[in-house]
Image (cartoon, helix red, strand yellow):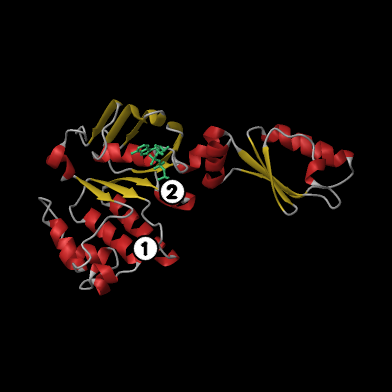
Amino acid sequence: MSAVTVEGLRKHYGPVRAVDGVSFTIEPGEVFALLGPNGAGKTTAVEILEGHRIRDGGTVSVLGFDPATGGRAYRERIGIVLQEAGFEEEFSVVELVRLYAGFYPRPRLPDEVIEQVGLKDKRDARVRTLSGGQRRRLDLALGLVGRPELLFLDEPTTGFDPSARHRAWELIDGLRDSGTTILLTTHYMDEAQQLADRVAVLREGHLVAIGSPDSLGQAERVSVVSFRLPDGTALADLPSLTGRVEADGSAVSVHTRQPARDLHTLTGWALERGTELANLTATRPTLEEVYLELVES
Ligand SMILES: Nc1ncnc2c1ncn2[C@@H]1O[C@H](COP(=O)(O)OP(=O)(O)OP(=O)(O)O)[C@@H](O)[C@H]1O
């Protein structure tokens, strides 16, 4: 059985179709990243799965529960790491983690979780004295202490310094290795590439792509043709191409679904003018490039 099955999910706010017929599944043990620009519907979809919002249509099954009616039995099996949880500022780190541990039937040891998220030095510090990044790690500890089968991670590393980010990635990798299913949202494509077995891209309430980070570009058949603009040539002198042209100084990149055609046009153009296209390459795009193609085209 899939850990998560979503079919035809809909949630409208008046005229805004925040989620408009979205279907996907997440397998047990999978790390699944939901991507999309601001307002695409990620939070709405995730909060429906968490049981925090009521859907208007479609079916949802998470660990065999309907989150809308799963109640406490459901909440005991999931972990939620919110972007900005409101904390009791006067508690110490260990007190707060202990408090949360008390909500679950089979909690992990608070000190073990505190160490895992890298807050051992701050174990007895008051929450109000924590830095932003340390608070985010505390969020993570609170999401983990109940030994969840499914963990919801909302932008888990926003505000982290680079080394904290890499530690968080290692931690999430470790959770995957221990069999935890993870649904994460992120605006960092390198994070999705690094962590996710599969990613889904939402745009205006619709799923526009789904697959492994590496397969996504192939499915969209987007390639990037790059070259240096010949001396004495302006961008406006280039022939008309099927792809989207971007320039950074004289470095030009063409994001195209028809790389052969655009390469042919470009090389024909260069030959006619008796010039070269320096640094000419045609590559598969990064996840970030595929993502931008999907959400901006
Ligand atoms: N409670 C609400 N009432 C009315 N409209 C809402 C409500 N919540 C979300 N929306 C609208 O639904 C759409 C989707 O919002 P949502 O928060 O799900 O997007 P998101 O993908 O999570 O964005 P972000 O990346 O900015 O967090 C937006 O147009 C938003 O304005």
Left or right side of 222 for 170: left
Residue 80 lies, in percent from the top left, at: 26, 49
Mark 1 or mark 2, earlier in chain: 1
User: Who's the residue at 58% across and 34% down the image?
Assistant: 221
In the structure shown, which secondary structural element does the residue marked by tag 1 occupy? helix
* Mark 2 Cα-neighbour bin, 10 Å: few <14, some 14–19, many ≥20: many
Location of residue 192 in the rendering, given as x and y in whole percent from the top left corner: 43, 48
Task: State which image quarter holds ligand 1.
Answer: top left
Residue on which disc 1 sits: 167
CA–CA distance between discs 1 and 2? 15 Å
Q: How many marks?
A: 2
Q: Is residue 164 above or below residue 289?
A: below
Dot label at residue 192: 2
**Which quarter of the rendering shows the C terminus?**
top right
Image x and y of residue 165, in percent: 40, 61
Is the residue at mark 2 in contact range of ligand 1, meaning its CB lies under 8 Å from it?
A: no
Q: Is residue 125 left or right of residue 14?
A: left
Sort mark 1 into few (<14), some (14-19) or many (20+) by Cα contacts within 10 Å: some
The residue furthest front is: 14
Give the residue type at disc 2: Ala
Q: What percent of the width, then of the height, locates residue 106? A: 11, 52
Q: Is residue 241 left or right of residue 90?
A: right
Query: Which secondary structure lies at badge 2?
Result: helix
- What residue is at 11 percent from the left and 56 percent from the top? 102
